[in-house]
Amino acid sequence: MEKVIRDGMVAVLFSPGFGAGWSTWITVHPAILYDPTVVKWVEDDKPKDDLARLEATLKEKYPHCYLGGIDQLDIRWVPVGSRFVVDEYDGSESVVLEQEFDWMVA
């Protein structure tokens, strides 16, 4: 799985807007959570004139993927090797690191 890593941090894509999730709605393709092409597009301020080409590329790379939420994507930089989960409520996603959970012990 190809990832963008800088200064010991991994770019994790998520869609914080309500309506459609990103990685939580594309569970059959976990690599899309880190896709370098999408990371670059987000970092380039999501140019609208590149969106159709990006969607075509992603549909070829990740067959049968749902691309809702693409226009609301953001990046959370997570330390390499960290355990995390993408939490979703009503399409709004957030990236939560393992140490940010308040775990219960039985």
Image: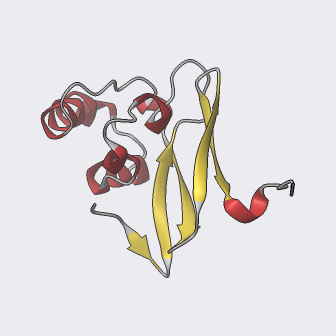
At 39% across and 40% down in the image, what residue appears?
A: 46
Relative to the observer, which residue lies in front, 35 or 28? 28
Furthest residue toward bottom = 7
Q: Quadrant of residue 43?
A: bottom left
At 27% across and 63% down in the image, what residue appears?
A: 2
Q: Is residue 36 left or right of residue 63?
A: right
Residue 89, percent from left and from top: 67, 26
Residue 18, percent from left and from top: 62, 22
Residue 78, percent from left and from top: 56, 66
Q: Quadrant of the N terminus?
A: bottom left
Q: How is the image coloured?
A: secondary structure
Relative to the observer, which residue lies in front, 94 or 87? 87
**Relative vertical location of residue 67 with respect to residue 77 in this rendering, above or below:** above
At 86% across and 58% down in the image, what residue appears?
A: 105
Relative to the observer, which residue lies in front, 62 or 101? 101
**Relative vertical location of residue 9 with respect to residue 102 in this rendering, above or below:** below
Furthest residue toward left = 60
Q: Quadrant of the C terminus?
A: bottom right
